[in-house]
Amino acid sequence: MSDRVNIWEFRDTAGHTAGTDLIGFHVEATDGAIGKIDKLSEAVGAQHLVVDTGPWILGRRVLLPAGTVIRIEIGEQKVYVDRSKDDIRNGPGLDDGAANVSADVRDRYGLYYDPFYGGRIF
């Protein structure tokens, strides 16, 4: 049995229920707040959050694969991820002009995040 995490699916233990509106929820890295959820994809095999980091990293938006989510607190309106601020800051940027996240963008983020979760290094 493998302990590999599929980064493009919410973990069973995260507390996510399909259809739950997480837009506007605050996102907490392992070492503090990083921003608010701007978009959410629940597409099979491509689940992810788009987070507006606000002034934290100069208004940059970042994509977080759903597998980074370890806990969702509906009452607090917070989503907790298992990556540090530096991990997120050092990841790929997201083009603000894009209305949807393309497969190419997901591939870039997959190359960055997958090795953290036991995936192969490309």
Image (cartoon, rainbow, N blue to C red):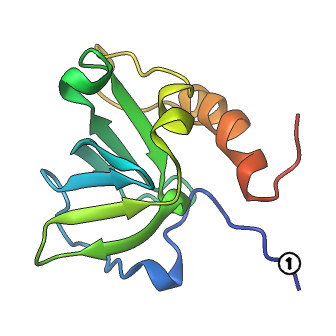
Q: Could you tell whether 74 is left or right of 49 in the image?
A: left
Q: x%, y% of residue 49?
A: 36, 48
Quarter holding residue 91? top right
Rendered view: 44 above or below 72: above
Q: x%, y% of residue 26?
A: 20, 53
Q: Could you tell whether 12 is left or right of 31 in the image?
A: right
Please name the amino acid that badge 1 sits on.
Ser
43 or 117, nearer to the observer: 117
Q: Could you tell whether 48 is left or right of 98 in the image?
A: right
Q: x%, y% of residue 118?
A: 81, 58
Q: Residue at x 52, y 52 (%)?
A: 46
84 or 16, nearer to the observer: 84
Q: Mark 1 = which residue? A: 2
Where the N terminus falls, by quadrant?
A: bottom right
Quarter holding residue 90? top right
SS assignment at label 1: loop
Where the C terminus falls, by quadrant?
A: top right
Q: Report the residue that reaches farthest toward the front.
A: 31
Q: Could you tell whether 35 is left or right of 90 in the image?
A: left
Label 1 Cα neighbours within 10 Å, binned few <14 / some 14-19 / many ≥20: few
Rendered view: 99 above or below 47: above
Quarter holding residue 101? top left
Q: Residue at x 27, y 31 (%)?
A: 53
